[in-house]
């Protein structure tokens, strides 16, 4: 058996960002059931994954009027899947991840990508919706997705230099009180620095790259990476091709992003935030993604089954078994142990 396969088998390999629920809803609407169990878990296991954040991402075409309804539809799909599958475990606290490992179940954590489902002109209504989604199992929330909303500016709005609104600050404060992980992915630079002045607990950037490697607004500057590490947080390095490299996205370039974070702040502050989307038939109308390209792939990491290539690449670059296991999941578990 190859050493990199052994490392994957021994590790709690965790992906901090997946839009799988959007695919699940599409297939359930066509009559399929137990979609995650039948279609996805075999692929996830083939790649060595033991858990992931299932993101509630409301596509642009549902905004603004139908964001709450769409979010609840995605959430309902997850609970239907949990009822139908014997191999999924919803994780609400750190101990649940440990139990999932012992029981041989796939650890499912619910996240929200953009607070649009919580938006209201009434601060109290937004906070009430936050508490309801918490009771429904959401344990990780990012304030924005690319664009501006009532909480903050996204990565495509940096020209305004806008930071967190009063609503954004109140939501972050309430999230920390309840025990929800704050995710800074997709925030503009100004909003991210504003948020860092507010938070007290460790945070994550669930999925991003390094701007020094690929100069995209969605990627993090060296200063941002250092600031996240200063909060004892974790940067999830993504495999989404347009964030990996403008011209030639490959597994080697993903490894360059990992190396860059490690060289800046150390192995304790980097993890996997793959954002695999090969199984979702996205369109520009659904995502509004400026960087959208038809059928993009990162060579060597085309889908989750290719994750062993990343582990093998880390070994070839001199990372120890202990360091690779930190990257694969232990660093995120450290944050969850502190926050949840």
Image (spheres, helix red, strand yellow):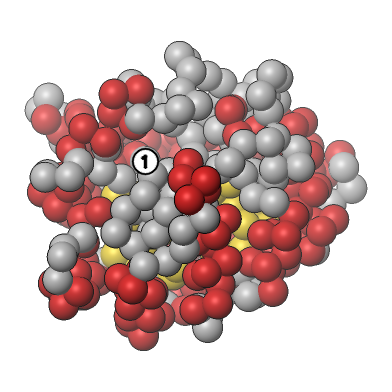
As drawn, 181 above or below 43: below
Q: As rendered, which of 134 and 14 lies closer to the eye?
A: 134
As drawn, 265 above or below 45: below
Q: Position of residue 50 (x, y in %)?
A: 49, 52
The residue at the point 29 percent across, 24 percent down is 285
On screen, residue 29 versus residue 137, left or right, reads left
On screen, residue 108 versus residue 322, left or right, reads left
Residue 183 seen from this side = no
Label 1 Cα crowd, 10 Å radius (few <14 / some 14-19 / many 20+): some
Quadrant where the N terminus lies? top right
The residue at the point 74 percent across, 55 percent down is 222
As drawn, 1 above or below 152: above
The residue at the point 50 percent across, 26 percent down is 291
The secondary structure type at the circle numbered 1 is loop
The residue at the point 36 percent across, 49 percent down is 148
Q: Position of residue 296 (x, y in %)?
A: 52, 19
Q: Position of residue 327 (x, y in %)?
A: 68, 56
Q: As rendered, which of 66 and 317 lies closer to the eye?
A: 66
On screen, residue 128 versus residue 282, left or right, reads left
As drawn, 115 above or below 288: below
Residue furthest to the right in view is 318
Q: Which residue lies under the disc numbered 1?
A: 19
């Amino acid at each position: 058996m190859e050493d990199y396969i052994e490392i994957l088998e021994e590790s709690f390999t965790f992906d901090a960002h997946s839009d799988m629920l959007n695919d699940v809803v599409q297939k359930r609407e066509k009559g399929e059931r137990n979609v995650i169990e039948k279609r996805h878990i075999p692929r996830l296991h083939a790649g060595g994954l033991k858990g992931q954040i299932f993101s509630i991402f409301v596509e642009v075409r549902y905004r603004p009027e139908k964001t709450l309804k769409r979010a609840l539809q995605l959430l309902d799909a997850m609970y239907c899947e949990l009822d139908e599958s014997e191999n999924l475990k919803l994780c609400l606290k750190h101990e649940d991840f440990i139990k999932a490992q012992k029981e041989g179940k796939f650890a499912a954590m619910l996240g929200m990508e953009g607070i649009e489902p919580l938006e209201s002109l009434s601060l109290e209504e937004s906070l009430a919706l936050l508490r309801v989604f918490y009771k429904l199992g959401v344990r990780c929330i990012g304030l924005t997705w690319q664009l501006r909303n009532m909480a903050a500016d996204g990565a495509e709005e940096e020209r305004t230099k806008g930071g967190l609104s009063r609503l954004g600050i109140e939501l972050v404060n309430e999230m920390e009180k309840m025990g929800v992980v704050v995710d800074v992915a997709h925030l503009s630079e100004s909003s991210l620095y504003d948020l860092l002045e507010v938070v007290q607990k460790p945070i994550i950037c669930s999925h991003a790259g390094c701007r020094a490697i690929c100069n995209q607004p969605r990627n993090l500057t060296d200063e941002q990476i250092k600031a996240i590490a200063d909060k004892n947080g974790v940067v999830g390095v993504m495999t989404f091709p347009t964030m990996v490299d403008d011209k030639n996205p490959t597994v080697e370039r993903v490894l360059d992003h990992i190396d860059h974070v490690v060289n800046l702040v150390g192995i304790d502050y980097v993890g996997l935030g793959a954002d695999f989307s090969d199984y979702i038939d996205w369109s520009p109308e659904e995502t509004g993604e400026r960087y959208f390209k038809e059928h993009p792939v990162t060579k060597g990491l085309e889908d989750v089954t290719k994750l062993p290539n990343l582990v093998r690449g880390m070994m070839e670059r001199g990372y120890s078994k202990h360091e690779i296991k930190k990257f694969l999941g232990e660093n995120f578990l450290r944050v969850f142990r502190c926050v949840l």
